[in-house]
Image: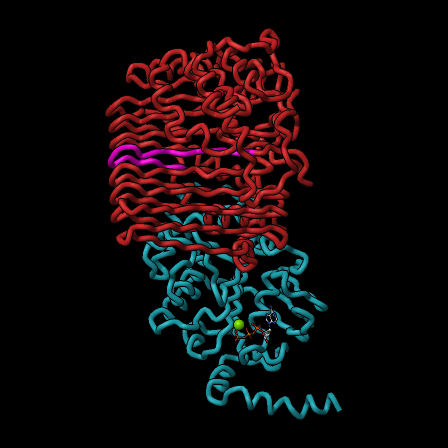
Chain colours: A cyan, B red
Amino acid sequence: MSTPLLKVTDLHASVGGKEILRGVNLTVRAGEVHAIMGPNGSGKSTLANVLAGREDFSVTSGSVSYNGRDLLALSPEQRACAGVFLAFQYPVEIPGVTTAYFLKAALNAQRKARGEEELDAMEFLDRVKAKVALVQLPETLLNRPVNQGFSGGEKKRNEVFQMAVLEPTLAVLDETDSGLDIDALRVVASGVNSLRSPQRGFVVITHYQRLLEYIVPDKVHILMNGQIVKSGGKELALELERRGYTWVEEELAPRSSKASA
Amino acid sequence: MTPQANDLEVLQQDYKYGFVTDIVSDTFPPGLNEEVVRAISAKKGEPPWLTQWRVRAYHSWTKMAPPTWSSVHHPPIDFQAISYYSAPKPKKKLDSLDQVDPEVRATFEKLGIPLEEQKALSGVAVDAVFDSVSVATTYKKKLGDLGIIFCSFSEAVREHPELVRAYLGSVVPHSDNFYAALNSAVFSDGSFVYVPKGVRCPMELSTYFRINASNTGQFERTLIIADEGAYVSYLEGCTAPMRDENQLHAAVVELVALANGQIKYSTVQNWYPGDKNGKGGIFNFVTKRGKCAGDHAKISWTQVETGSAITWKYPSVILQGDHSVGEFYSVAVTNNYQQADTGTKMIHLGRNTRSTIISKGISAGHGQNSYRGLVRILPRATGARNFSQCDSLLMGDLCGAHTFPYLEVKSPTAQVEHEATTSKIGEDQLFYLRQRGIATEDAVNLIVNGFCKTVFKELPMEFAVEAQKLLAVSLEGAVG
Ligand SMILES: Nc1ncnc2c1ncn2[C@@H]1O[C@H](COP(=O)(O)OP(=O)(O)OP(=O)(O)O)[C@@H](O)[C@H]1O
Ligand SMILES: [Mg+2]
C-alpha cells in the first residue's frame, strides 16, 4: 500500500509535566475522513495541537509522519505550508487586522513556500469571494478584524472559510460543529464535503454523531485518557450516542485492571 | 541679580553689548551663560527683541531644575559640558554608498528606501536624478504663489520678523519648563510655516525637502501658524535611522490655529536608541504644544516614536476657541533599554470643545513605556468632551508599561471617557497565525500593526506604510 497521509505512532505528549497523550496510534490515508470522539479532557484538542506544532506541548516519545516526512521536525508554519490545517476549537481574535489581509498573508506565505507565485489583491479577492459564499458568510466579513466581535457560529464558519481558501492536504477540525445551529452545521459540512478529494485527508473531532450524518466518516475513533481505545465504522458513533462513554470504560476496565495486576 | 533689574538691563543693551566670546570660531567652547546666549544671537544676526527674549529665557532657566516627575532614569546631564553653538557645517560627503556603515545600509534596505534617497540621507553626493535642492525649489515656488511661507526659522526671523515676533512663545512661553527655557535661550534653527487666511496647503510639508534641514542641531525650534480657515499638514522626521553626536535634544514646537484653521502635525521619530545593552542613544526631551486660538479650530498630533534612548514628550493642545478640536494619536515603541514617557495634555477652555486621545505603547526587551496624560476642563468649557484610550502591548516579561491619566474636570456638563488596556502579545494569536503559514516575525508584525491601526490610519498614506516597516525593524527579534 502507498505511504499513508498521516501516521501517528505511539505518541506521548505532556504539558506542564502532566502527560496528556499516552500512546496514540492513528493512520489516515489520503481520501479518508476520520472522526475522533471522546469525553471532555480526554486529549482530543491536545492531539490536534500537537499535530499542528503547538510548542506548549512537549512530545516525549513516539513519531508522526506526514506523507512520509517527519512532521514533528517542522515548525508550525512549515507544517501549514506543507498542507496541514487546524480548524481551532477556540478561534483567536486579532484586533485591527482584517480577515482579508490576514488570509492573503497566509495564502501568499504558503504559495511562496511552495514556489508558487504570490497573488495580488485582485486575484486574491476573486478567489475568496466564491469561498465566502460557500460558507454563507457576508463579504463584509473580509473587512472586519479577524474573529473580533464574531458570534460563536461565525467564528466556526470562518475557520471553514479559511480552510476552503487554503486548500490543505490534511485538515484537522476541532469541534467545528460545536455551537452551530442546524443550518450552520449543514453549511460547515458542505464546506468540508466540497473539499473531499482522493488527495486529502480529514480528522474531524466532534462530540456529536449528528455531524457525521453530513460528513460521513470512513473511521471513528474513541480517544479516552490520552489513548485511542476503540476504533470502528460510522456505526460506532451511533452506539456512542445511544450509550455514552461508560460502556466503553466498562469494556476496557477488566483489561486494564488485568494489566495493572 | 534680580530678574527685574536684569530685564531692564537687557532692554537697554545693544545686541552686541557684552559680546566677548570669540565670534570667529565655528564652535563655542562648552558652557552656558548670558554671554553665550548673546553670542548665539549675534552669530545669527538677530534683532534686539529676539536677543532679549533669549536672555530672559536663559534667566528663567537658571532658576529651574530638570524635571524629576517623569518615569525616565538617566544620569544627571552636565549642561556646562555642552557646546551651544556650532556653525552649520555641511555633512562630510561620501563618494559612494559603499562607505556607509553596513548596519545603517541594512536598515535602509529593510525600510525599502530608494537608492537615491539612501544616498541623500547618508550624505553621499547625489546626481541630477534626485536633487533635493531642486525639488525644494519647485515646492517653494508653488507654495509662494499661494502666499504660504515655509522656510527655516532663521530665514523667517530675517524675512518675516513681524510674524515670528507675534507668535513666538505665544503657546510655549520661554519660561514654560526647564527644557523649553533652555531651548528658548539657545535654539539653533528649525522650521517656520505660515498659511494665510482661507488657504489650503496643497501638499504635505516636510522638513525632508527643506533646504539645510539636516543641520538644525540639537535645539530645534518650530513655529507653525494656520490663519483663519487655513489648513496645513506637516510631517516631521523620517523613518531612516538618524544618528547624531549630540546626546541631548530639546526641541520646541509651537502650533497656532486661528478660527476655522486646521493643523495636522505628524512625526516619525527614529533617533539612535542606543545599543542592545542600553549604551549611547539620544535623550529626546521635547515640548510640543498647539493652541486652537479661534472658534472651530482643530489641531491633530500624530506620532510614531521608535527611536531615542529616552523620549520625554507630551504634544498638547490648548482648546481656547469655542467648538475647537484637539487630537492626539500616538504609537510609542521601546525595545532593549529604551525608555519613553509620553502622552498629552488637553486643556479645554472654550465651550463645546472636543478632544480625542489614542495612545498605543509597545514594550519589548527591557523597554519601559509610560503614558502620562492630562485632561483639564475649566468651568467655562461647558459641553466639553474628551475620549481617551490608552492601550499597552507587552512583548516578553522584562519590559514594562505604565499609565498615568490625570483628569481635572471643573465643568459639570463635561463628558469624559477613559479606556485603558494592557495585553501581552498572545501566544494564542501567534500560534493561530503561524498555523496558517505565517512566519513568527511576520506574525508579530501583523499583530503589532493591528494594535496600532487606529493611529496609523491618521498618518498620511506614504508615511503610514513607512511607519509599519519601521515598527517591524524596531521590534526585530523581540519575540521568538
Ligand atoms: N496548557 C495546559 N496546561 C495544563 N493542562 C492542560 C493544558 N492544555 C490542556 N490541558 C489539560 O489536558 C487535558 C486534555 O485537554 P484537551 O483540551 O486536549 O481535551 P479535549 O479532549 O479536547 O476536551 P474537550 O472535549 O473539552 O474539548 C485536560 O485535562 C486539560 O485540562
Ligand atoms: Mg477540545
Q: Quadrant of residue B259?
A: top left
Q: Which residues are magenta?
A: B284-301
Q: Quadrant of residue B337?
A: top right
Q: Decide whether the magenta segment is chiefly helix, strand or loop.
A: strand
Q: Is residue B285 magenta?
A: yes
Q: Nearer the viewer, residue B477 or B169?
A: B169
Q: Position of residue A7 (x, y in %)?
A: 64, 67
Q: Is residue B167 magenta?
A: no
Q: Nearer the viewer, residue B242 or B311?
A: B311
- B169 in relation to A81, above or below: above
Q: Is residue A17 visible?
A: yes
Q: Is residue A9 visible?
A: no
Residue at screen point 41% across, 17% down? B151
Q: How many marks?
A: 0
Residue at screen point 60% across, 46% down? B367
Left or right placement of residue B95 versus residue B318 in this view:
right
Q: Position of residue A120 (x, y in %)?
A: 43, 41
Q: Position of residue B193 (x, y in %)?
A: 37, 22
Q: Position of residue B59 (x, y in %)?
A: 51, 25
Q: Quadrant of ligand 1?
A: bottom right
